[in-house]
Image (cartoon, helix red, strand yellow):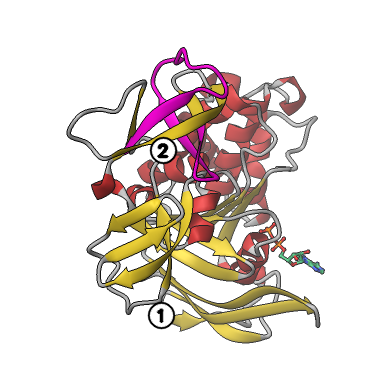
Amino acid sequence: MLLELKSLSKRYAPATTAVAGVSLAIDAGEIVCLLGPSGCGKTTLLRLIAGLEQPDSGTVWFAGRQVTAVPPHQREFGMMFQDFALFPHKNVAANVAFGLQMHGWERPRIAARVAEMLALVELEELAQRDIAQLSGGEQQRVALARALAPGPRLLMLDEPLGALDRALRERLMLDLRRILQQVGVTAVYVTHDQMEAFAIADRVVVMNGGRIEQVAVPQALYARPATPFVARFLGFHNLLQGVVVELGLVETAVGRFTIPEANAPKGTAVTLLIPPDAAQITNYPLPGTHCQPAIVTALSFRGRYTQVWLRLNGVPLMFEQPTYPSWRIGQEVWLGLQLERILPL
Ligand code: ADP
C-alpha cells in the first residue's frame, strides 16, 4: 500500500464537518476516484492528502511514513484542477517545462522530459503553439503533461474534465485512463459524475456527508450498491421499502418477494433494489410467470433505450426498454419482475 488515510476528520466551522472519520488505503499504481454529490467532502479529502489542509484528527501515511505535518511541496505530489491555470501566452513546451525549471532541472534534461511528455499526450506537433490557440481538450492534455512531468509520487486530479463539453469528456476519459496506466502513476481523482468514475477508476470511493459509503471496483459498485444512497447516486430509481416478514421473505407495497439474502430477523426494515432491466412489460399477462397489472405514467426517450415509468399499487417504478414502446399514458400493462435480480440493500 502506498497511501493510507487513518480516521481523517476535518471541520471548517463547528457546524460543518467536511470530512468525518475517513480511512482508506491506496496501492501503488492504483487509480482511485472519489465520487459523490457536491459538498460531500471530496475536495477537502484531496486537500488533506495534498497537505493543503491539516486534519483536526487522524493521520496521512505515504510509503510507510507519516506525512500529516509535511508541507505540500515536500510531499512531491502532482495536482491537476478543472481550472488548470496554464500560462496562456507561453507555448505548450514552455508550459510543460515550467515545473521542471522550478525544480532546478538542467536544460537538456528538461528538453528530453518535455519531449517525452508531449509524446505521451500526443501533442508533439503543437509544442511551439501558444496555449491561447489550443482547444479545450488540447489544453487539458497540456495540463496533464505538466502535472506528470516532474514524475510525482502521487497525482491528484480535481474534476479535470469538469469544464469540457460532453463529447470531448467522453474522449478524454479514455485518453486519461490510458495515460495514467501507461505512466503507472498512483492517482486520486475527484468527480461527481459516476460515468467518469466508472471509466477512469480501478476503484471508486463513494462519499456522502464527509463519510465513505462504499469502496468497490466499478463493476461491483454498479452490480451491488451497498446502500440506498449509493444506489440513488448511481441513478437507480426502483428502491422499495420493505420489511422482513419471515426469514428470506420481504413484504413491500408491490408484493412479497423471496430474497434468500434477506436473512435479517423478522420485522427488520430493508430496501430492495429492482434494476431497470429486471422486468418484462407486456400487453397481456404472460402465462406461467408472476406478473401484475401496472399503469403507464410516462415514457421518456433516451436514445438507446426508453424509460418506461409505471405505477403499481401507488409505487412509481422505472424500467428501460430497448425500443420506443407504443403504449399510451394511462394504459394498463403487465409487469413481470425477474425476482432473482432483486437486490436487498
Ligand atoms: P465537494 O468537493 O465534495 O464538493 P468540499 O470538500 O468542497 O465538497 O466541501 C465539503 C463541505 O465543507 C461543504 O459543506 C463545504 O461547504 C464545506 N467547505 C469546504 N471548504 C470550506 C472552507 N474553506 N470554509 C468553510 N467551509 C468549507
Residue placed under numbered mark 2 in the picture? 276
Q: Residue at x 34, y 70 (%)?
A: 245
Start-end of magenta stretch: 309-336
The answer to which image quadrant residue 180 occupies is top left
The furthest residue to the top: 326
Residue 179, position as x, y percentages in the image: 43, 39
User: Is 267 located above or below residue 227 in the figure?
Assistant: below
Q: Locate residue 73 relative to residue 325 in the image: left or right.
A: right
**Along the line of sight, the residue nearer the viewer: 273 or 4:** 273
Mark toward the viewer: 2 or 1:
2
On-image quarter of the C terminus: bottom left
As for residue 325 lying within the magenta part, the answer is yes
Say which element carries label 2. Answer: loop
Disc 2 marks a residue whose amino acid type is: Pro
Disc 1 marks a residue whose amino acid type is: Gly
As for residue 311 lying within the magenta part, the answer is yes
